[in-house]
Amino acid sequence: MKANKGEWSEFYAFLKILEDKKLFAADNKLEIIAGKFFIFKKIIRSETNKKRKIFELKKSEICILDDKGNLLKKIKDEELRGKTLNIFKKIKNSKGTTFEIPEAEVLMQKLLCSQLKSDNSKKSDIDGVVYDRVSDKEDLLGFSVKSMIGGASTLLNAGETTNFVYEVKNLSPALISKINNISSRSKIQDRLKAILKNGGILEFYKIFKPEFEINLRKIDTIFPIFLSQMLLDFFMGNANKVSDLIDLLDKNENLKKNFRLSKSDYEYKMKNLLISAALGMVPGKEWDGFTKAHGGYIVVKNNGDVICYHLYNRDEFISYLYENTKFESASSTRHKYGKIYKEDNKMYLKLNLQIRFLA
């Protein structure tokens, strides 16, 4: 069985919960908050053929049940001890895009797991029954898993769905070919600078796919305008960190004149996008506004710690997202952006949005 680091990390997070039966909460710097943790009573996994297995976490053992509650197997805690850490080391030290971990496959068989990760159609990667010590209640919650092993993961993935379309005005059509042929290392930035140097103006027109525009307008009806300016600032090389791009929005005189918003207004809207992307919204599908990962966010850190942002510590989670994400340029060839093109006797150019965690 071959998988990438993110997929193996999801299985490692599952094993870590089985072994520890709890996950620690984290602050806005991804550091463990001492004494604050979430107790897991059960893990529910969707297996092949959409069959579920329930892992009941007892004091010193794990009971594996089918979805009708029939006991399939019992495993003592000591059978996992040491193996989870060894699998983390294999994930961290493995080379290549995808790789095998034979020890993990043996453990999968022992745990009656028929597949490595959750169904891609689900937003939640891990579903569990979590005990809330405040309300003295147990709730079934879904968690999204992100891995920091081997590099920072993406929060909002690039695609043609995340292309923003700008109308190019006041530019001679005779320059299109020359500008499009700029192939320097910073070719997108250099093309934009060439457009402006030759008297061109870039004016936001629309988001290429209507589903993503609808989702962004659900956050705020004029939010696409602000994001389009952040994208321009990013591709012009002015900043890449989300919080720095918000600073530039706040200093933009045109936006100040037209919308009279404060920096905290821009922050609020951007934070809503970040947490929406983390817990429910995907660009290519119209979003109903509801959280799909109802429990929160699990992060597998590069040192092997597995921490949790529960909806109970939502403020720390939002702050973490805001302070630890950046815009990133994905492949312009694959996602079809960065060149001027003509349509209905007008000129347009697309820029692409991808958001990644800081390393």
Image (cartoon, rainbow, N blue to C red):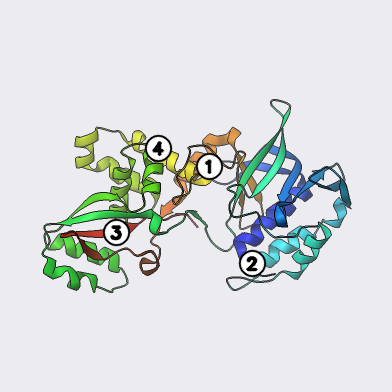
**Cα gap from disc 1 to disc 3, whole angstroms:** 34 Å
Q: Amino acid at mark 4?
A: Lys
Tag in front: 4 or 1: 4
- Mark 3 or mark 4: name the one nearer the start of the chain: 4
**Cα gap from disc 1 to disc 2, whole angstroms:** 30 Å
Tag in front: 1 or 3: 3
Residue sticking out furthest to the top: 135
Vertical placement of residue 8 versus 122, above or below: below
Residue of label 1: 28
- Mark 4 or mark 1: name the one nearer the start of the chain: 1
- Mark 1 or mark 3: name the one nearer the start of the chain: 1
Q: Residue at x 28, y 53 (%)?
A: 233
Helix, strand or loop at mark 1: loop
**Cα gap from disc 2 to disc 3, whole angstroms:** 33 Å
Disc 1 residue crowd, few under 14, some 14–19, many 20+, Cα 10 Å:
some
Is 250 left, or right, of 294 in this rendering? Answer: left
Question: In the image, residue 359 lies at what x, y percent?
Answer: 50, 58
Disc 2 residue crowd, few under 14, some 14–19, many 20+, Cα 10 Å:
some
Residue of label 4: 218
Tag in front: 2 or 4: 4
- Whether residue 85 is visible here, answered yes or no, is yes
Q: Quadrant of residue 68?
A: top right
Q: Nearer the viewer, residue 250 or 55?
A: 55
Q: Residue at x 46, y 48 (%)?
A: 285
Question: In the image, residue 132 lies at what x, y percent?
Answer: 70, 31
Is 64 left, or right, of 356 in this rendering? Answer: right
Label 1 close to label 2 by CB (< 8 Å): no
Residue of label 3: 350
Helix, strand or loop at mark 4: helix
Q: Which quarter shows the N terminus?
A: bottom right
- Whether residue 240 is visible here, answered yes or no, is no
Is 213 left, or right, of 24 in this rendering? Answer: left
